[in-house]
Amino acid sequence: MRAFFDGEMALRYRTFCKILAACLLMMHGLIAQAAEMPKEVQTFIQRRDTCDHFRGEEGYSKARQALINRRLHQYCTGTDAQLARLKRKYAGNPEIIEKMDAYEATIEISTRRTR
């Protein structure tokens, strides 16, 4: 009985997390559109917010950690460079720069080897 309860609770938790993530993405999308942000900025905001969500998730099991790692790779890879590029491109737009300044400049783990 306990195994069923634990499995059911895990399923409910995963469903809750998916719904929460979708709501957060929609909220950020609506906020970005309301501010008339360029599409590439809106897309970055949605992707990076999803990345940051998964950065804060707990890997309480091997399967959960594997899922988190896949999502981190999917949503976080390339966002450091994209953030820097958007900041350069929109340097003259204080509204966009304010949005971009809310994000950490370096979150990706370097894949380069050091000697």
Image: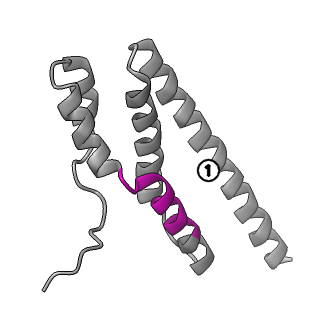
User: Where is 22 relative to 39, above or below?
Assistant: below
Give the color scheme: rainbow, by chain, secondary structure or one colour: one colour
**Dot 1 crowding, Cα within 10 Å, few <14, some 14–19, many 20+:** some
For badge 1, the amino acid type reads Cys
**Any part of residue 38 in sight:** yes
Q: Look at 27% across and 49% down and name the residue there.
A: 81
Q: Look at 84% across and 73% down and name the residue there.
A: 4
Q: Which residue is mark 1?
A: 17
Q: Look at 31% across and 61% down and name the residue there.
A: 108
* Farthest residue, direction bottom: 115
In this image, 43 relative to 67: left or right? left
Magenta residue check for 73: yes
Rendering coords of residue 34 (x, y %): 44, 13
**Any part of residue 56 in sight:** no
Magenta residue check for 27: no
Rendering coords of residue 113 (x, y %): 22, 80
For the residue labelled by badge 1, is the local secondary structure a helix, a strand or a loop? Answer: helix
Where residue 114 sits, quadrant-wise, is bottom left
User: Where is 42 relative to 95, above or below?
Assistant: below
Helix, strand or loop for the magenta stretch, by majority: helix
